[in-house]
Amino acid sequence: MLSDMLMNTDLISDIKKKLDESQYNVFITLLSAFKSGKWLYPGVIKRKVGITTELTYDILDSMEQNGLLKEYYELYCSKCQRLSGDIYETISDLPNTFYCEMCNVEMSAIENAILVYKVV
């Protein structure tokens, strides 16, 4: 589990410094549900832990740098607020545009891609 892997790194002390005790406990409990190969969405961490978007990405970026996560890009429709399910490994892999089947709109992929993470 991701929380077990995190406990075996020096990263844990850095994360503890950034969160209060309640936030840290929620964060660790939340991570216990994530196993290798599962997708982790920053918005879920932000909402459940109650931290800013910037702090969420800061923590997740640190986890990626420590080999616990790998970042990907998922297309997101800004009109209907739905994820497309189309995930790309690098930003250069994104198409120029994509079509949202829910709201029948074609839009820029790069402007509507969100960063998501996969547990290594």
Image (cartoon, rainbow, N blue to C red):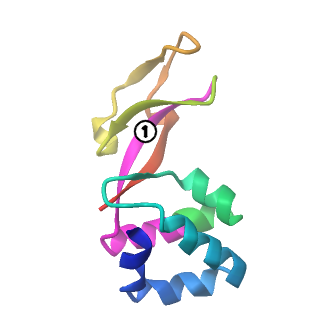
Q: Is residue 26 left or right of residue 35?
A: right
First to last magenta residue range: 58-79
Does the magenta segment cover residue 62?
yes
Q: Count neighbours of disc 1 (C-alpha within 10 A) and say few if under 14, some if 14 to 19, many if 20 or more.
A: many
Which residue is pictured at 54% across the width and 55% down the height? 42
- Residue 118 at what x, y percent from top left? 36, 54
Which residue is pictured at 37% across the width and 25% down the height? 96
In the image, residue 99 sits, relative to residue 94, either above or below, namely above
Does the magenta segment cover residue 98?
no
Q: Is residue 67 left or right of residue 52?
A: left
Q: Is residue 6 left or right of residue 29?
A: left
Which residue is pictured at 31% across the width and 60% down the height? 36
**Secondary structure found at label 1:** strand
Q: Quadrant of the C terminus?
A: bottom left
Residue that carries the numbered disc 1 in the rendered image: 74
- Residue 99 at what x, y percent from top left? 45, 16
Q: Quadrant of the N terminus?
A: bottom left
- Residue 119 at what x, y percent from top left? 35, 60
Which residue is pictured at 48% across the width and 68% down the height? 32
